[in-house]
Image (cartoon, rainbow, N blue to C red):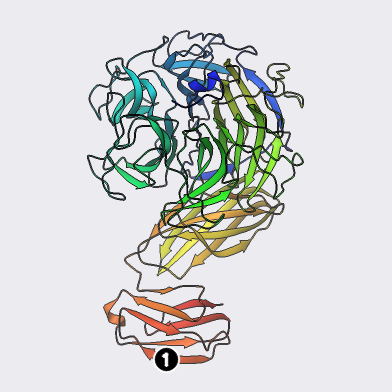
């Protein structure tokens, strides 16, 4: 067992929070005014260790409230309601209750599960929903929301089907529209070892071992991912810290061991900061926070290892390359924070090492963390209430709000009223959400003395964004993809970058359109350099003050009309012409320089043909095929 930072930390659990990016027809960013950076005590008690009031299942009431707890997981649904499941109270009791909070009414509703503690799971038949099904009481489970609005949980420490307590590896789905749970995958018993199989190969027998405190994500294809945690590897009879990365495909119901080790307690390999490498890997850890960015990359921050060392390192995993990159923070443990000036980014700034922080992401792809148990400005270990932003475009940290000292007491003020002096007290393993206006909400958690909260707080707001509504559409016609978008109430907009991807994850800019900057406007862009198969597009909408947001992603299929492809583009000294039409073989293609002068004409003799650009001046040059099609090439 790990040595303890404090007796309360024995009860620790992972609180990881992922903002699920739903594919919707209109992408909306709103702001009612300037950034206030103020906290509001919204609901719950301003004292610790309070019992819950459940009321009637399914019925909202002003008196209802979840009891004190930590290590629960959280969801936000398409209607903006907040949900919490499970957790652990200050007496060490485990919960399996599911609650919903509706911000519009300010009311809590007990939705599912039990109003008692220590309940066993009722698994039913794997893959079949039933009104009697329910996960056992637990804490430290990973969680996701899928594209259909279903909630998913994996693992945690809790009770199995026969009431034994241990480390779980069961995967569950909750459908809010039916109110039913389904046991999807994994075991209905505790303390199961992982079956890793061959790295990179899915198999029906594969499964992640029982664990708690793992990070979790869902990718653009609907696959679920988990990283690390505290539990069982593939061979040991005792638990330890893990650094394995797994993917679960719901359509095939199979797990794949993707990266990391199949044994516990392995040290990290950092390599060079900012440089991806096949040998890089985060070391064993649990209680880290996790995000997924707009490009589909996974990020983790912090956590602690088998020796109770705390981390403040930031890592990125790129699924398309399978490589880890150490992005920020230290490759040593137990570091104090360097706060700098509140509100000012600096290269020397960094959060201190910590566990159990909440994590969020704004519309510009920047990451935020709140609180945790860790090291403050003076290197003192305790509960934190600091709020940090990591700006992905600069790689810099900013201390946004809260204190640079550990174990600060909360200042509640008047319930429902924001004030500059209000602040939650230092805490860790709280729930967290970010709403449609990019306000942050937190619920519950644990202080350094082992007391639990049941208070709900709102922070207004992460970012100030202009009012913007954008609809984005596309059409394939005549070997071209025509993109169009309309804006409503444009304010302070600079430009729209058009980004394209072949896999829906890795996007690159293919063009830019200047914005009018105000009012209601129509825009368009034509992509006439098409590739074979499906293509994905999104808009990166840049404001004059440097803030940017993304549109929804759209997919266009034009495989019936693709005749050829040219890559790379932009190019330096060579390009490859790839054809997909037999009729183009043994025909001629002409190369024109940026001034329109014919440089060369040659015959197409193979499906892939190299073209020398070394004698062509820089700029936009052209290839013209015998069928009259022309492609632009940017010679760098």
Residue at coordinates 47% horizontally, 57% vertically from top-left? 537
- Figure check: 603 above or below 319: below
Q: Quadrant of the N terminus?
A: top left
Question: Taking 128 as reference, is 399 left or right?
Answer: right
Residue that label 1 marks: 601
Q: Is residue 150 visible?
A: no
Tag 1 secondary structure: strand
Q: Where, quadrant-wise, is the C terminus in this rendering?
A: bottom right
Left or right of 244 on screen, residue 252: left
Front residue of 493/308: it is 308
> Percent position (x, y) of residue 479?
40, 69
**Which x, y percent locates residue 105?**
58, 19
Left or right: 65 as drawn, with respect to 531: right
Residue 153 in percent (x, y) is at 39, 30
- Residue 78 horizontal/vertical position (percent): 48, 33
The residue at the point 44 percent across, 13 percent down is 93
Query: Residue drawn at (37%, 85%), measured in percent from left and top?
Result: 626
Is any part of residue 532 visible from this angle?
yes
Q: Nearer the viewer, residue 149 or 191?
A: 191
Name the one closer to the observer, 96 or 465.
96
């Amino acid at each position: 067992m790990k040595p303890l930072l404090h007796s309360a930390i024995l009860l620790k659990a992972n609180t990881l929070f992922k903002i699920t990016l739903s594919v919707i027809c209109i992408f909306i960013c709103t702001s009612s005014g300037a950034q206030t950076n103020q906290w509001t005590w919204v609901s719950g008690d301003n004292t610790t260790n309070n019992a819950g009031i459940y009321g009637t299942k399914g019925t909202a009431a002003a008196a209802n409230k979840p009891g004190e707890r930590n290590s629960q997981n959280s969801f936000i649904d398409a209607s903006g309601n907040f949900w919490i499941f499970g957790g652990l109270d200050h007496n060490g009791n485990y919960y399996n209750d599911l609650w919903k909070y509706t911000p519009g009414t300010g009311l809590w509703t007990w939705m599912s599960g039990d109003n008692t503690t220590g309940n066993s799971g009722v698994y039913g038949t794997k893959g079949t929903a039933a009104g009697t099904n329910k996960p056992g009481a637990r804490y430290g489970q990973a969680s996701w929301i899928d594209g259909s609005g279903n909630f998913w949980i994996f693992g945690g420490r809790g009770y199995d089907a026969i009431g034994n307590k241990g480390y779980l590896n069961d995967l569950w789905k909750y459908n809010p529209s039916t109110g039913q749970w389904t046991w999807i995958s994994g075991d209905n018993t505790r303390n199961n070892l992982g079956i890793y199989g061959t790295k990179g190969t899915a198999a029906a027998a594969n499964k992640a071992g029982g664990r708690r405190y793992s990070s979790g994500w869902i990718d653009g294809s609907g696959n679920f991912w988990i990283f690390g945690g505290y539990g069982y590897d593939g061979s040991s009879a005792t638990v330890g810290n893990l650094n394995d990365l797994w993917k679960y495909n719901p359509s095939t119901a199979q797990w794949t061991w993707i990266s990391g080790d199949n044994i516990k307690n392995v040290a990290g390999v950092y390599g060079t900061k900012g440089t991806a490498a096949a040998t890089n890997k985060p070391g064993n850890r649990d209680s880290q926070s996790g995000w997924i960015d707009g490009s589909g990359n996974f990020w983790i921050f912090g956590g602690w290892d088998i020796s109770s060392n705390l981390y403040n390192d930031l890592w990125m995993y790129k699924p398309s390359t399978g490589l880890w990159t150490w992005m920020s923070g230290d490759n040593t443990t137990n570091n104090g924070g360097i706060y700098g000036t509140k509100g000012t980014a600096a290269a020397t700034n960094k959060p201190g090492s910590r566990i159990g922080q909440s994590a969020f992401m704004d519309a510009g792809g920047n990451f935020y963390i709140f609180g945790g148990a860790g090291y403050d400005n003076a290197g003192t270990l305790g509960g934190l209430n600091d709020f940090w932003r990591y700006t992905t475009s600069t790689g810099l940290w900013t201390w946004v709000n809260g204190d640079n000292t550990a174990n600060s007491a909360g200042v509640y003020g008047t319930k429902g009223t924001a004030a500059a002096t209000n602040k939650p007290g230092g805490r860790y393993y709280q729930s967290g959400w970010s709403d449609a206006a990019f306000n942050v909400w937190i619920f519950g958690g644990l202080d350094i003395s082992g007391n639990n909260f049941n208070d709900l707080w709102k922070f207004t707001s992460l970012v100030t964004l202009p009012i913007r509504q954008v609809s984005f559409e596309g059409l394939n016609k005549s070997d071209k993809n025509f993109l169009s978008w309309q804006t409503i109430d444009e304010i302070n907009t600079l430009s729209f970058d058009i980004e394209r991807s072949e896999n829906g994850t890795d996007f690159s800019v293919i063009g830019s359109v200047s914005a009018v900057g105000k009012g209601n406007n129509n825009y368009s862009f034509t992509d006439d350099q098409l590739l074979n198969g499906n293509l994905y597009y999104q808009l990166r909408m840049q404001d004059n003050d440097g803030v940017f947001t993304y549109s929804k992603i759209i997919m266009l299929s034009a495989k019936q009309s693709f005749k050829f492809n040219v890559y790379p583009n932009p190019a330096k000294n060579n390009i490859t012409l790839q054809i997909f039409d037999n009729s183009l073989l043994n025909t001629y293609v002409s190369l024109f320089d940026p001034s329109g002068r014919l440089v060369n004409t040659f015959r197409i003799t193979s499906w892939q043909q190299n073209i020398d650009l070394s004698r062509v001046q820089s700029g936009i040059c052209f290839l013209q095929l015998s069928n009259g099609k022309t492609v632009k090439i940017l010679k760098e």
